[in-house]
Image (spheres, helix red, strand yellow):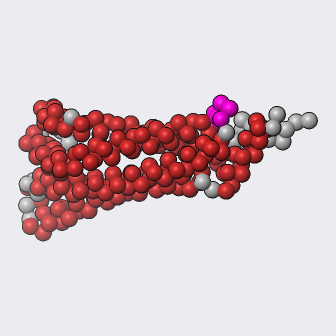
Amino acid sequence: MVSPSNPDSLPRPIRFAAITCLVLAALTGWAAISEATELAHFFESRSRRMEAGSPMLLGNDPADFQRLLEAQYQALEPMREPRALLMGVLAIACAVVFVSAGRILKPHGMPRERIRMLLGRAAIAVAVLRTIDGAQWAVVARRTSNAVSQILIKRPEYQDPATAEMVSTVTQAMSLGLTVAGTALIAGTFALLGQFFRSDSVREALVTRDSPAADP
């Protein structure tokens, strides 16, 4: 008699959610590790980037790029130690999500129900940490947008006071808006994934697939 459910198969929504966890956790975790490493060597990193020169994004004046970098690092300097700690914890949480999602897809004999609970909690933790990350980065974005505004209003087309004021307002709004949107997208997705794996429907689906292994 053929078993009605293959213990190694997963419903498509669960498989898709697990793969999404893998991709998001890998990208978010790698970004957190990179920033934590840079913050751990804050002054060396700042000097290296200053010496590297402008990537030609703000025109031909290297001083503009230097001013932008200086504004960014001045905003980061007071929070470098707590932010480095935050990035380290975020990287660890992302690693837990990554490994747990991989075990949901390929349990290798481990009960998926226990992995599900760990994955749900870890994804929620990443959502909270990424929200804190976004709040900190909003401070940096605000300081950096002020520097960008000062660079832009030096151009001849923005010399009119009304135009300069509009450029400053739009630059700050765009910078803050992009930061908030990025935070909402990443943190919100992790929160949704965490709630999904904590749901009763997912629990029942995984318990059903654990049963054949438990009862040979």
Left or right of residue 161: residue 117: right
Q: Position of residue 206 (x, y in %)?
A: 69, 45
Q: Is residue 178 visible?
A: no
Image-quadrant location for residue 180: bottom left
Residue 76 colored in magenta in the image: no
At a point 45% along the width and 42% down the height, the residue shown is 94
Q: Position of residue 86 (x, y in %)?
A: 33, 46
Q: Which secondary structure type mostly characterizes the magenta part of the structure?
A: loop
Q: Magenta stretch?
A: 105-110
At a point 10% along the width and 39% down the height, the residue shown is 62
Q: Position of residue 55 (x, y in %)?
A: 19, 36
Question: Residue at the bottom extreme?
Answer: 162
At a point 26% along the width and 48% down the height, the residue shown is 82
Quadrant where the C terminus is found in the figure: top right
Relative vertical location of residue 148 with respect to residue 163 in this rendering, above or below: above
Of 27 and 103, nearer the camera is: 103
Q: Is residue 119 visible?
A: yes
Of 151 and 113, nearer the camera is: 113
Image-quadrant location for residue 198: bottom right
Left or right of residue 56: residue 31: right
Relative vertical location of residue 126 with respect to residue 53 in this rendering, above or below: below
